[in-house]
Amino acid sequence: MSKITNKTDPTSASVFDAYDRYVQGLRASNPSSNEDSILTSLLVRRLIPVIGGPVPKGQRATPFEQQVALDYLKTIPAIKLKDAPILIEQAFTPEEKGGLRRARSIVNQFCQRLEEWRYFLPEKEKKQVLEDNRHKIGMFHSPAGQSRKDWGGAKTGRHHANRYGRSKKAPYALMAMKAVNTRGDKRTEQVFPEDYINDLLEADLQGFLGHSSSKAAGTITKQTSKIKQILGWLHRYKAVPLDQLRLSSIITYSEVLVDITDFLPAGFSFESLEDVDACAPDLANKVAVKKMILDASAETAARENRLLTEDFLGWLGLKAKSQIAYVDVFLSIACFIYRNELASSACRESRTIPTIRELLNLKRLLEKEVNNHSESVPFHLKSIPWEECIRVVEELRLRYEEKYTYTKETRVKHGTAKKKRTPYALARDLQDFLSIALMVVIPPDRSRTYYELELGRTFVFGAFDGRSFTPAAQLKRHSDAKWYIHLEMEDYKTGKRYGTYWAPIPDIMFVNGVTLYEYIDEWLSWGRESHKPVNHNFFFRGTSDGGSLNHSDWNIRVTTLFERHTGVAVAPKELRKIYISYLKSSRATRAELEAASVAQHHSQKMQDSVYDQREQMDKLQPIYDFNERVIDAIFEEMDNARRADISNTPQMNTTDLRLEYKKHLDETEQCFDVIRSTINEAAKGKDVTRKQPKARK
């Protein structure tokens, strides 16, 4: 049975789980007490080194050393603390026995509470707890405390809001589609059956696609989707009839260039400079006036276009960073509407067209707002440690390996009913396991890489020697074959810059002796088509319908799995940041960081500015460690120099020292006698002088 990480579960909890639960209780019951800090210090400086964990360098553990030590606690079971009262005695030297009494008291209280919480269960009793908990496997697919019936109904509920509080809007896009799933037969149908795209709008959309052909296919798809959202908003909230919808309904066109031929007689052309003299004398004035009129009209249209854009963005209610993506769509439409002007020499600079200038100004304001404000959802609320991601992989594997479900049943022997799991359930769990495993065993790539993994094209089995690829069927030894993710330039976002990419998938072995490749073989041999035949060549498929996946499908799958196992809704895109932050915190070498940037198809500048999401104290820790090493080195050098000076000074034995002392004492006594006799003689002389009478004149 797969073990779900739970700090209150004595069968699966780590030392850190038990410690964290205990410390939270201390802080809640007595916030002013420092007992939690003392316990943390004892664990980091005393107990963890004794049980084989990291050892702090100095007398006090740095924040980084403390975090490393606590991370180590996540890797060992809670029962390891059963002997903590004995180990704490060994951790103190005889010279430190003064602090042992307080330490012993705190550790004993800690262990007594863990004993009450049943973290130190005997193996026999632990097995019984596991048996008692087996029936809970049927609850894994529902959020804690919620049944499926609670998901529907009011549109303000969990099903109609994202995980960070913003409610979803009801469908509004033009030609919006919804999924219909009947007994696994998943299909789509229009939300609004009366919607249609008129002929002129269809021509506009086709022209827009042709104008955008130089962009990546993914970008075009996203922008087309957003255009339909804007058109749907115009129809449903601005009352624009379906037969009148155009791209010019989004961006109004206004002429910006003066055509001088409009002021010339029919058939007249400039063939030489002499022809200018044949023009009407007021031609220049007419052209200037026309230019002024067009400029005023274009400025008015630009303001109206910006107001419409701001109206739509305000209705969406998104954060500035998300609004920028929609402003880019308005800009793309404007560039299409004004494509002829942009092709002329008079408007080589797009900002010379008022509408484009207004939209660029709006985008600049939004970018400034993004730079001046922190993220709407802080990174630490939507991420977990990288080590936790690896644990999720193992938990998913264990879940798949559980071939039976267990339910509490009073009518059967031992009170537990055992039932074999269906192939559908096992295939679902196998695909969930492989979905996360392929994102963890190599540096995490973008979501598209995984949901577009195509057998024989982007996911291949064979041998690659750096130049050419040989399929497994053509190899002399099948054992030489590996699985590779192979991407061409059009297969990923930055492909035009970084070119063809090959990533070998390591055939890691799990604790049960089964390798990752064996699990992949199981998926391909029976799991992928266990429910129904698959009519595509992608490695992954929809859970119920067996169809191909898109970005939304993959995002929901990954986020749901992480939320189920860790309580944090980790989106696929956050894994890249989590991984880079982990490398930075682990002091990865420059070569390792460069390799990670190659594997993730981005520059090291992007790695530092976007993907490194460490907390400020974590980023500062290396310079604090450096300063501490420098200070310690200088102090040690000064101490050694002082000791050397003392050792070089001539030393006297005890007899010589006593003689030297007696000599100084004799000299002092002689000095004293001389001074005393001098004072006495001076006093006598004064008395004699006083008794003698003064001589008469």
Image (tube, grey):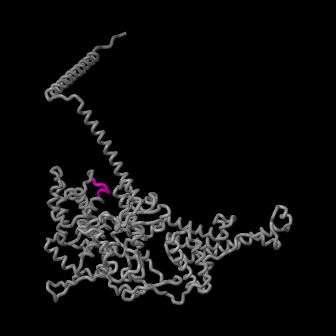
Residue 328 in picture, x, y percent from top left: 55, 70
Q: Which residues are magenta?
A: 60-66
Which is more toward the observer, 559 or 66? 559
Residue that appears at 15% across and 61% down: 85
In this rendering, does residue 456 appear at all?
Answer: yes
Height in image: 20 above or below 147? above
In this rendering, does residue 571 appear at all?
Answer: no
Which is more toward the observer, 614 or 489? 489
Q: Is the N terminus in the top left, top right, bottom left or bottom right quadrant?
A: bottom left
Q: Is residue 654 left or right of residue 274?
A: left
Residue 667 in picture, x, y percent from top left: 20, 22
Residue 644 in picture, x, y percent from top left: 26, 34
Q: Which quadrant of the figure has residue 65?
A: bottom left
Residue that appears at 34% across and 85% down: 148
Residue 283 on the magenta segment: no
Most extreme residue toward the top, as rendered?
697
